[in-house]
Structure formats: structure tokens, C-alpha cells
Image (spheres, rainbow, N blue to C red):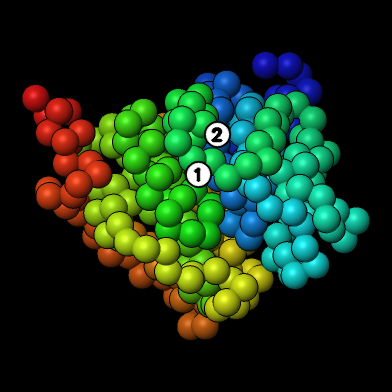
Amino acid sequence: MKDESLLRYSRQIMLPELDVAGQQKLVDATVLIIGMGGLGCPAAMYLAAAGVGHLIIADDDAVELTNLQRQIAHSEKDIGSPKVASAAASLQGLNPDVRVTAIAERLSGGRLQELVKQADVVVDACDNFSTRFAVNESCIAAGKPLVSGAAIRLEGQVTVFDCRDARSPCYQCLYQARDDDDVSCASNGVMAPVVGIIGSVQALETIKLIAGVGSPLVGRLVLFDGLALNWREMKLPRDPGCEACAQRAAESTE
């Protein structure tokens, strides 16, 4: 690692849990972030600042004025531009050593599977169930950990699904596959800092997974209540009858 990099990341490197070896793991890592909205923006910015070497960011939307209340990687001059282009410029301005691959499309099918395979960790920062279920299935198939977050109104939640651990649930253990419900901020509203809090926790969980430090939120669902400003943790067991992950779990124990 270059002297300049050692200086840039010095406040992380001095942490005994991370040290130089952990920082090098971050530099060598690839993270796929799906969604460059309220969750994806802070998650991506903290991962870039922390030194994750390659960020793949995917989103098919363009920046709108209403996004600027919470999507901190975009600015007024970016209105009308693809979100991934705006975010990529912000991320490289923050840390030019980070390589950013911008994918201006809604990922699905083979394209989604291809990008998941390239990543060490996948961050789900999208706002619709159909994409979330598809991302979950791709992570199970590729054996990649998934950091899942959601926020709406004054509430949020974060958990980690890691199919490398036979005890870990998957997204479909938590939510049954169904038609898309309308869970967008456009229809329900959201307080700006709430998405920042949840997105930042997603970034922290991603760093922990890459560097192998601490205890990731596998089998635990953390719920945030912004109105009361409190956190609750619930155990999230794997559903042995889950259509998405039961077979994978069975294979891993054979």
C-alpha cells in the first residue's frame, strides 16, 4: 500500500480490529451496490471513503429535484443526469483511488447474476420487492453475502444474509415472494437523515464482512425508530421450508 494511502486510511488502520491487513482487504475488494437513491448514496460514499477498491453501482433512474432532499451523492446541477453518472463523479471526487463501474440499468436475469459473481459483497439499496427477490436469488446462487437495508417514513431496518453460513436466513425467509407492494418514498415519504443512518449501517456491515471483523448482522434484524430514536434487535431464523434457500442450506451441510 502506498504511503499516501496509509495516510488517507490512517484513522482506520490504527484500529486493532482492522490494521493494515484489514485495510488491504478493503482495497482489494469489489462491492456491488444496487440502487443509487437514499440508501445507496451514503453507503457508496462511506465505502469509497473507507477505501473499497472497486464499487459497481447500478440504477436506471435519472436525478430529480425531489431526490436532493436525501440522496446526498447528487446535486442540483445533476438533475436530468443518470444517477449512476452523478454518483460516480461524487465518489471519485471523494476518493480518486477507488474504481467505479457505473451501470445505468435495472439489473435482472443473467446480467444481475454476472455482476453478483464479480462482487465480494452485494448491497441491496433498491426500493422494490421484485428486484430484492431477484438479488436474493442471485446471491444464493453465487454464494455471496447480501447486506439488506430499507427505510421509509421515520423507520428503517438492516440485516445481513450470508448463504455461506448454513444457519443464515435469506431475504425470502423474511418476506414471502408476492406482487410488488408500493413501498417507495414517493408514495409514503421519508425523513432525510433516516436513509443516511440505514445506508451508513449498511456500509459498516459491508466493511465488517470484507475485513472479517466483528459480528455481522447474520440472523439478526435491527429495526430503527427515528421518531422515538431507539433501536430494536430481533432474531431472524432461517426458514427450513424456504423455497429460495432451503436447498442451498441442505447442500452446505452434506
Name the residue at 49% across, 40% down: 108
Q: Quadrant of the C terminus?
A: top left
Residue placed furthest toward the left: 254
Question: Residue at position x 87%, y 61% from top?
Answer: 76
Please say whether residue 114 is visible from this viewpoint: yes
Looking at the rendered structure, the kind of residue marked 1 is Val
Horizontal and vertical percent position of residue 97: 75, 26
State the image quarter where residue 187 is shown. Answer: bottom right
Viewer-side residue, 172 vs 17: 172
Q: Judge the density around disc 2: few (<14), some (14-19), many (≥20) Cα neighbours within 10 Å.
A: many
Which is more toward the observer, 204 or 87? 87
Q: Residue furthest right?
A: 77
Judge left or right: residue 68 versus residue 115: right
The answer to whether 153 is drawn above or below residue 55 in the figure is: below
Residue 170, image x, y percentages: 29, 47
Q: Are marks 1 and 2 in contact (CB under 8 Å)?
A: yes
Query: Which residue sits furthest bottom?
Result: 228
* Horizontal arrangement in the rendering, residue 119 relative to residue 144 (left or right): right
Q: Which residue is mark 1?
A: 123
**Secondary structure beneath disc 2?**
strand
Q: Residues within 10 Å of mark 1 (few under 14, many from 20)?
A: many
Q: Which residue in the structure is indicated by mark 2?
A: 31
Give the residue drawn at x 48%, y 26%.
114
Instruction: Judge whether residue 16 can be spotted in this image.
Output: no
From the image, which quarter does the N terminus lie in?
A: top right
Q: Nearer the viewer, residue 56 or 11?
A: 56
Disc 1 element: strand
Residue type pointed to by label 2: Val
